[in-house]
Image: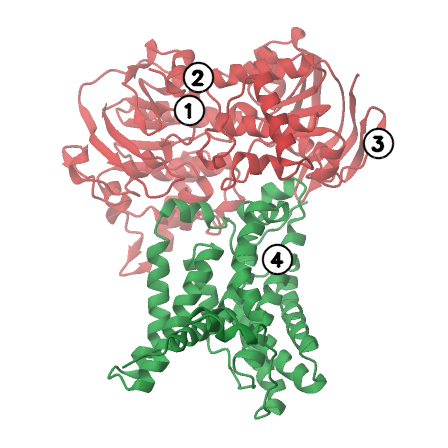
């Protein structure tokens, strides 16, 4: 039975932004379709419209010539449209089986049988009776896929499914998706990763700033042509020069452990590494393997034993972030709007938060506004932050501009070491390029970087040495030239 | 000194009777909180239930109308809370506190005309069986229907949450309203229902106080029991069976300290009166120490407003 899905003249407008501007597309079963675009291009809005989460201002959806009224996710389900969201829609404290039975009308036993059949057929192995929070990201995704398959969908939409997966898990997912496609399920695959589009899909639709830019067959495209369509300009590629390997040690971590009381956190076990001046150490891993805990331990948000961290010949393991900054360390946390900046505060006020004894932002307990504003203006011009209003609240800066501001705030005091965690997460290509250039510049000035990132390509591009974190343990430290993304993938999955 | 074994039975029965309003209100609030809503208005809903029950009993003379009327009053006042927090997306904590202040005030106003009026006797069940078994007789028999309902409620609540589909949906909404909404569950409807149910149980708890436990109306007669009920929910880590244990300890100490005061034990009265509150919380903290279990049973979205954006 053939499935035909048609999106006709869909428009969705948010205050200040047209998320979908008159988009029309047509899909047929038997093929895998890619919907490609940068963050903010409108692809997520489009698939949320298809899954009933968002109601469009204008436009119609047809499934096999029937006009669908998708006013709620329930309507999408009833019409056999299944969706796996980028941020999982699972109930962490409920068991896997409870997660699956909650929106099913079947009896416990018959549902269990059905799930077993699906798992056998596609080679999934998941314990149905443990809470979802104990599953890995890949397993959680499989639970989401099973949830869709139970309803035997005609259409399956995958929103950025590989952002949390290892290389191995990704190739497993691709095999499953191809199998689903052969069985007649129409697959729409949303991504901003070009490689995946080339590997998996038959046709590709590119979106930019809410508009549909092109629809074409994969065989007529290559990575460069798609990249240019996606960004709308020709991109220069950045290449890092090989670092002048000094043997001057800057930071040394010895036998660092962190045991957490919270079952949602990962314990760190026996962490040992050192970074030399002018070097970038990359730490790879799938998110949730202890990166956030490692960042907090390094930044001083979590305090450890005094002797476990040696920086510039001082033992600083028991110091808080402010005290560590005085020793010329700098930090750029993962969550820009929660950890790095306070959204409701103005740009210059956020700058003042990074306060040094030497910066004289405060006189006798009073705020020295002129001094701070002068300092903020320097950051904005030095680091290309695209605004001239330092009174603007930080929440109104785009992700890229906010990240430039944060990196600028950290770097303007020329620290010896910058520790950053997913610095380009969710940014557009232009901003990513700028951040990468800045990081390379730091190394050229003989300053060091610890780069914790879930983006393998970024790590390979910027690091001199790479280690992989898995379940709170670090792998041995490798020279970046000897490492390939395949090898990293294997280590990220936990193999030796 | 020989103590009559039936006297011990009577003491245990009176302990259980004083635990009844706590069990009712806590089990109601537990369902509300499991759906992610923090309603601090339990004290206010209870006292509204107390005055409504007593007033309806005096005016209509019907116990059935009075009991159900008190539950309905609890539902009505919690509807205000539900409308404010779920439809107008106000802050749960502030709205709940306002509800308590409102309840205490309005109950005192209505209650002016009912002060000093004697209550009615509430029928008890199995009275004749009381003397058939020593010790157990007075414990098991001769209580009101509300009493039996209260002691069944923790088990019913536990079964409801663990074994039924609707219970699962309630837990899911409390865990992640966003996911639930994306799954097509009507989060607002579920939360409304849970708030109203909590209101009904608080109303019933109040009616038990003014109609059965001490059949009369006294201003502010709930005396902080609503707050203890709230504390029981949290310190029991949202487990109905532990609520039962906590309510029994609290009830037990309340009764025992009365007797100790009567006997004339030389401990300051203030300390004795405070004892049930302190000991109940300490015991519940100790039996619920497992941080992993706490994390698993705490409704992740508790007290957070959910606003579906479209």
Vertical order, B35 against A339 (above or below) = below
Q: Are marks 3 and 2 on the same chain?
A: yes
| Mark 3 vs 2, N-terminal side | 3
Colouring rule applied to residues: by chain
x, y percent for residue A476:
27, 18
Label 1 or label 3, whichever comes before in sequence order: 3
- CA–CA distance in space, label 4 to label 3: 36 Å
Mark 1 in CB contact with mark 3 (< 8 angstroms): no
Viewport quadrant of the C terminus of chain B? top right
Which numbered circle lies on residue A436? 1
Residue found at x 32% / y 32%: A419
How many neighbours does mark 2 have within 10 angstroms: few (below 14), some (14-19), or many (20 or more)?
Answer: few
Label 3, label 2: how many angstroms apart (C-alpha)? 48 Å
Q: Quadrant of residue B253?
A: bottom left
Q: Which mark is residue B194?
A: 4
What is the spatial separation of the Cα atoms under label 2 and label 1, in whole angstroms?
A: 8 Å
Q: Is residue A83 visible?
A: yes
Residue A190 spot, x, y in % from top left: 62, 24
Q: Chain of mark 4?
A: B
């Amino acid at each position: 039975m053939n499935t035909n899905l048609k999106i006709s003249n869909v428009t969705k407008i948010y205050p200040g932004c047209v998320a979908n501007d008159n988009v029309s597309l047509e899909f047929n079963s038997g093929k895998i379709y890619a919907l490609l675009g940068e963050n903010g291009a409108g692809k997520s809005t489009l698939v949320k419209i298809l899954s009933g989460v968002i109601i469009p201002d204008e436009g119609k959806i047809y499934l096999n010539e029937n006009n669908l009224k998708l006013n709620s996710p329930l309507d999408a389900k009833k019409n056999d449209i299944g969706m796996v969201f980028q941020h999982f829609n699972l109930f962490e404290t409920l068991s896997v089986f409870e997660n699956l039975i909650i929106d099913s009308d079947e009896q416990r036993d018959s549902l269990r049988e059905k799930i077993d059949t699906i798992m056998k057929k596609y080679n999934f192995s998941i314990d149905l009776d443990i809470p979802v929070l104990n599953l890995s990201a890949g397993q959680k995704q499989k639970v989401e896929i099973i949830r869709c398959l139970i309803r035997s969908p005609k259409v399956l939409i995958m929103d950025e499914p590989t952002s949390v997966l290892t290389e191995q898990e990704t190739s497993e997912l691709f095999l499953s998706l191809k199998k689903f496609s052969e069985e007649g399920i129409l697959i729409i695959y949303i991504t901003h990763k070009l490689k995946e589009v080339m590997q998996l899909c038959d046709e590709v639709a590119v979106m930019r700033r809410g508009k549909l830019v092109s629809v074409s067959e994969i065989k007529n495209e290559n990575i460069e042509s798609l990249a240019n369509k996606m960004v709308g300009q020709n991109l220069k590629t950045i290449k890092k020069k090989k670092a002048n390997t000094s043997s001057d040690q800057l930071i040394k971590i010895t036998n660092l452990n962190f045991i957490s009381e919270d079952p949602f956190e990962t314990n760190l076990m026996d962490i040992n590494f050192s970074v030399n001046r002018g070097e970038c150490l990359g730490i790879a891993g799938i998110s949730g393997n202890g990166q956030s805990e490692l960042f907090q331990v390094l930044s001083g948000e979590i305090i450890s034993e005094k002797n476990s961290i040696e920086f510039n010949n001082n033992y600083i393991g028991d110091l808080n972030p402010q005290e560590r900054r005085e020793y010329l360390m700098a930090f750029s946390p993962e969550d820009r709007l929660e950890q790095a900046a306070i959204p409701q505060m103005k740009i210059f006020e956020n700058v003042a938060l990074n306060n040094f004894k030497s910066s004289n932002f405060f006189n006798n307990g009073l705020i020295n506004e002129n001094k701070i504003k002068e300092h903020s203006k320097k950051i904005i011009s030095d680091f290309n932050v695209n605004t001239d209003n330092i009174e603007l609240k930080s929440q109104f800066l785009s992700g890229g501009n906010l990240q430039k501001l944060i990196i600028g705030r950290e770097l303007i005091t020329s620290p010896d070491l910058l520790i950053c965690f997913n610095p380009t997460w969710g940014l557009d290509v232009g901003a990513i390029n700028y951040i990468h250039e800045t990081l390379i510049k730091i190394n050229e000035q003989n300053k060091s970087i610890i780069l914790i990132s879930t983006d393998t390509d970024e790590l390979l591009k910027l690091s001199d040495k790479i280690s992989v974190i898995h379940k709170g343990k670090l792998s041995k430290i490798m020279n970046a030239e000897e490492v390939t993304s395949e090898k990293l993938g294997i280590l990220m999955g936990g193999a030796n | 000194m020989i103590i009559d074994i039936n006297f011990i039975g009577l003491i245990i029965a009176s302990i259980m009777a004083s635990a009844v309003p706590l069990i009712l209100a806590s089990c109601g609030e537990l369902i509300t909180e499991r759906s992610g809503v923090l309603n601090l208005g339990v004290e206010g809903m209870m006292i509204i239930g107390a005055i409504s029950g007593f007033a309806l009993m005096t005016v209509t003379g019907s116990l059935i109308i009075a009991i159900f009327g008190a539950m309905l009053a609890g539902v009505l006042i919690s509807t205000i809370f539900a409308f404010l927090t779920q439809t107008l997306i106000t802050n749960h904590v502030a709205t709940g506190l306002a509800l308590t202040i409102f309840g205490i005030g309005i109950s005192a106003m209505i209650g002016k005309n009912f002060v000093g009026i004697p209550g009615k006797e509430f029928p008890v069940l199995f009275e004749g069986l009381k003397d058939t078994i020593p010790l157990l007789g007075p414990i098991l028999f001769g209580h009101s229907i509300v009493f039996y309902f209260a002691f069944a409620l923790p088990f019913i609540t536990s079964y409801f949450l663990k074994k039924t589909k609707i219970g699962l949906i309630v837990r899911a909404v409390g865990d992640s309203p966003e996911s639930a909404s994306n799954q097509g569950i009507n989060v607002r409807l579920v939360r409304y229902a849970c708030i109203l149910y909590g209101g009904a149980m608080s109303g019933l708890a109040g009616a038990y106080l003014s109609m059965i436990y001490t059949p009369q109306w006294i201003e502010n007669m709930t005396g902080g029991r609503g707050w203890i009920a709230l504390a029981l929910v949290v310190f029991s880590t949202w487990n109905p069976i532990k609520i039962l244990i906590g309510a029994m300890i609290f009830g037990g100490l309340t009764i025992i300290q009365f007797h100790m005061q009567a006997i004339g034990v030389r401990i300051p009265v203030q300390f004795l009166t405070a004892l049930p509150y302190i000991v109940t919380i300490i015991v519940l903290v100790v039996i619920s120490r497992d941080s992993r279990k706490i994390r698993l049973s705490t409704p992740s979205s508790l007290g957070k407003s959910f606003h579906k954006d479209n």
